């Protein structure tokens, strides 16, 4: 599976930067022990006291810093700060095309495998860390739809409800891109 993901991601990415402020998120696939047979993705719920994205489900990540060596370095640094992910246990698999957030930030999703057990500890920005099985995300019976407005259009975006959490909005769009590119899921984001 991991080699297939790397291959598909390398075929996928050939874009130029947007010129907007940049951020990175990490789509981290647990890939050790029992997770080799049944991989899961790491999601977070942001703390309710934050001024932006409070209480929302997201991937670990954040804005690029001048000290980051590259955008993947941003995703690693932010993941370490937010959930105590040990960067040495992470293997980069590739990058999905960026999306522009409603705050006009270029969000770059990086896909990586987490190859060793972790002790996740949320920082003050994170209320909860949880994982979602890939099989759950790929099962069309678990997908619901919600209308969101993006760039003057209304879109019917897939959402998932699991573990008292709702994966929606930009995080759902990134999840859909990941599933479509890496698993040929053919999950549609419909206009209207």
Image (spheres, rainbow, N blue to C red):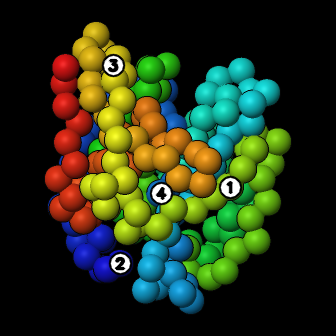
Furthest residue in direction front, as rendered = 141
Front position in the image: 75 or 47: 47
State which mark lies toward you, 2 or 1.
Answer: 1
Q: Earlier in the sequence, mark 1 or mark 3?
A: 1
Mark 3 is surrounded, within 10 Å at the Cα level, by few (under 14), some (14 to 19) or many (20 or more) other residues, namely some
What is the quadrant of the C terminus in the image? Answer: top left
Q: Are marks 1 and 4 in contact (CB under 8 Å)?
A: no
Residue at numbered disc 4: 27
Front residue of this view, candidates 67 and 131 = 131
At x 27% / y 24%, what residue is drawn? 155
Of the image marks 4 and 2, the number of the one nearer the N terminus:
2
Give the side of residue 24 with respect to residue 138, left or right: right
Spot occupied by residue 147 in the image (x, y as percentages of width and height): 34, 24
Query: Mark 2 to mark 1: distance in Å?
Result: 23 Å
- Mark 2 and mark 1 lie on one chain; the one further toward the N terminus is 2
Q: Which disc, if any, is residue 150?
A: 3
Q: Which residue is mark 2?
A: 2
User: Marks 4/2: CA distance?
Assistant: 13 Å
Q: Is residue 23 left or right of residue 13?
A: right
């Amino acid at each position: 599976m991991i080699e297939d993901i790397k291959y598909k991601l390398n075929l996928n990415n050939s874009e130029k930067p947007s010129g907007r402020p940049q951020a990175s998120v990490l789509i981290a696939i647990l890939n050790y022990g029992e997770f080799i047979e049944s991989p899961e993705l790491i999601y977070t719920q942001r703390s309710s006291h934050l001024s932006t994205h409070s209480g929302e489900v997201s991937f670990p990540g954040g804005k690029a810093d001048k000290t980051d060596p590259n955008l993947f370095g941003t995703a690693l640094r932010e993941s370490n700060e937010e959930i105590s992910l040990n960067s040495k246990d992470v293997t980069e698999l590739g990058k999905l095309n960026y999306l522009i957030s409603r705050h006009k930030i270029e969000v770059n999703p990086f896909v990586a495998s987490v190859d060793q057990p972790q002790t996740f500890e949320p920082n003050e920005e994170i209320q909860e860390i949880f994982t979602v099985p890939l099989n759950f995300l790929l099962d069309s019976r678990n997908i619901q739809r919600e209308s969101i407005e993006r760039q003057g259009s209304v879109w019917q975006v897939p959402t998932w409800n699991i573990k008292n959490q709702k994966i929606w909005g930009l995080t759902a769009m990134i999840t859909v891109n990941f599933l479509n590119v890496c698993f040929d899921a053919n999950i549609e984001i419909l206009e209207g």
